[in-house]
């Protein structure tokens, strides 16, 4: 099933033929042992990708459900949560916490910048925080969190580290077995979804909990949800033929195929590829006379927020790209109308990005700007090559 458009938004991302073919397989019973085998292998591969000795939960839902599930199973009503926000999607934890009766405090970065570890430590020194949420790559700003700095700043105060990996998982390293300066300085929860760097259509919420996070759930009297309670799902994830709620069968087929693709490429190679693509895209965009909203040292490998040169009409520009087969996303909140967001993650190819850059250059030229698309493509390839040696 060929992709008729280049869907280069911050998710969903283009779906490759192997995954489309898996999605199109005959639907089995959700209690069929053959299906259970497929699901079990996908869960095992997910544990390997995150390098965890905890548990993986893959259920029908969106990334928003994964956010809520992560909090509902680790932070009880009335307990304190610190939200470290680098943009719109970091702020979404505020509403989730409020709905669950969690007392949330927020550290909000200036858009385009990171919260400094010292700010986090100053807040945590006040005491009483059960957990801290951090968005790995915020799709509203294109800013990525620096885990090497942020994880130790959180863990030294004993709080659970909850990582929103929706726009990062399978594109940036999220190693839950990694020690960030001390044996117990590790990521405790990763929440994510199927439709971004994993490369499957929307429909799966994925939550991975470390043994410490699992213990937090056991210490809670109740979970403020029935569907999201991991105590209901844990037996099913161990034996998927058992019933709690009906699995999204065909989505699991696609997810299992995606896990095979990731394993074949290798996580280290996949992360290097995403870093190289991100650097290449940003360099190519700058060669066209446009700017990236996030500074290079904080820019996410999985997407870029791109600012227009003076005089570009946002709706006209993105509509023209769409007519040429390139779909990009608008900027959000105060940045709306000032640029666009370009996703560069998942099972995409350099040829796709080169073609996209040429369409962007062609459209800018039509709008009165002199832009060399061939040069931009060469810049992309050169920078990509330099970062994959």
Image (tube, helix red, strand yellow):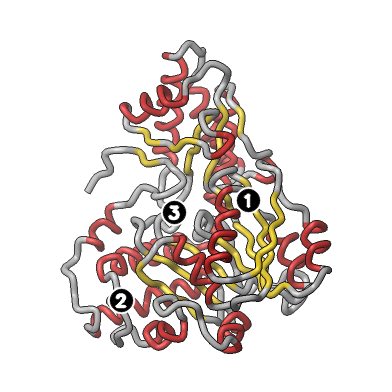
How packed mark 3 is, by other alpha carbons closer than 10 Å (few <14, some 14-19, many 20 or more), is many
> Label 2 neighbourhood size at 10 Å, few (<14), some (14-19), many (20+)?
some
Residue depicted at x 33% and y 51%: 15
Q: In what element is the residue under mark 1?
A: strand
Give the alpha-carbon distance from disc 3 to disc 2, as whole Å: 21 Å
Q: Looking at the image, which residue is at 58% across and 79% down?
A: 210
SS state under label 2: helix
Can you say whether 266 is above or below 101 in the image? above
Taking the spot 72% from the left edge, 79% from the top edge, the residue there is 184
In the rendered image, which residue does mark 3 sit on? 196
* Residue located beneath label 2 in the image: 38
Upstream in sequence: badge 1 or badge 3 = 1
Q: Earlier in the sequence, mark 2 or mark 1?
A: 2
Which numbered circle lies on residue 342? Answer: none
In this rendering, is residue 111 above or below 41?
above
Question: Can residue 382 be seen in this snapshot?
Answer: no
Which residue is pictured at 27% across the width and 53% down the height?
Answer: 17
Q: Is residue 18 left or right of residue 211?
A: left
**Residue 229, horizontal then vertical, whole percent:** 46, 80
Mark 1 vs mark 3, CA separation in Å: 15 Å
- The spot of residue 5 in percent (x, y) is 31, 38
Q: Is residue 370 in sight in this rendering?
A: yes
Say which mark, if any, is on residue 144.
1
Residue 339 locus on image (x, y percent): 53, 30
Please name which of the two marks, 3 or 2, marks the residue nearer to the observer: 3
Which of 341 and 67 lies nearest the eye of the viewer? 67
Mark 1 nearby-residue class (10 Å; few <14, some 14–19, many ≥20): many
* 254 versus 226 height, above or below: above
Disc 3 element? loop
């Amino acid at each position: 099933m060929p992709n008729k458009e280049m869907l280069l938004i911050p998710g969903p991302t283009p779906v490759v033929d192997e995954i489309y073919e898996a999605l199109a397989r005959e639907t089995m019973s959700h209690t069929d042992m053959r299906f259970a085998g497929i699901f079990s292998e996908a869960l095992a591969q997910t544990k390997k990708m995150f390098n965890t000795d905890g548990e993986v939960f893959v259920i029908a839902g969106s990334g928003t459900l994964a956010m809520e599930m992560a909090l509902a199973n680790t932070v009880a009503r009335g307990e304190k949560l610190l939200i470290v926000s680098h943009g719109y999607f970091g702020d979404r934890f505020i509403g989730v916490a409020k709905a669950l009766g969690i007392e949330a405090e927020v550290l909000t970065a200036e858009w385009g910048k990171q919260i400094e570890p010292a700010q986090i430590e100053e807040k945590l020194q006040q005491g009483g925080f059960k957990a801290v949420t951090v968005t790995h790559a915020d799709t509203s700003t294109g800013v990525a969190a620096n885990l090497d700095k942020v994880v130790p700043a959180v863990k030294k105060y004993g709080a659970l580290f909850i990582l929103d990996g929706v726009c990062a998982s399978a594109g940036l390293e999220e190693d839950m077995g990694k020690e960030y300066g001390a044996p117990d300085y590790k990521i405790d929860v990763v929440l994510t979804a199927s439709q971004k760097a994993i490369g499957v259509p929307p429909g799966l919420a994925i939550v991975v909990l470390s043994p410490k996070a699992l213990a937090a759930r056991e210490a809670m009297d109740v979970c403020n949800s029935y569907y999201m309670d991991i105590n209901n799902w844990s037996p099913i994830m161990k034996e998927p033929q058992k019933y709690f709620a009906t699995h999204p069968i065909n989505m699991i087929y696609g997810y299992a195929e995606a896990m095979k693709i990731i394993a074949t490429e290798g996580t280290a190679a996949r992360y290097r590829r995403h870093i190289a693509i991100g650097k290449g895209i940003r360099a190519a965009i700058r060669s066209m006379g446009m700017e990236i909203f996030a500074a290079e040292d904080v820019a996410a490998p999985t997407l870029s927020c791109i600012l227009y040169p003076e005089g570009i009409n946002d709706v006209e520009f993105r509509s023209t790209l769409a007519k040429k087969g390139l779909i990009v996303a608008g900027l959000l909140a105060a940045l709306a109308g000032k640029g666009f967001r370009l996703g560069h993650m998942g099972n995409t190819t350099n040829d796709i990005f080169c073609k996209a850059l040429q369409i962007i250059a062609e459209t800018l030229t039509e709008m009165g700007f002199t832009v060399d698309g061939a040069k931009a493509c060469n810049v992309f390839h050169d920078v990509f090559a330099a970062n994959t040696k």
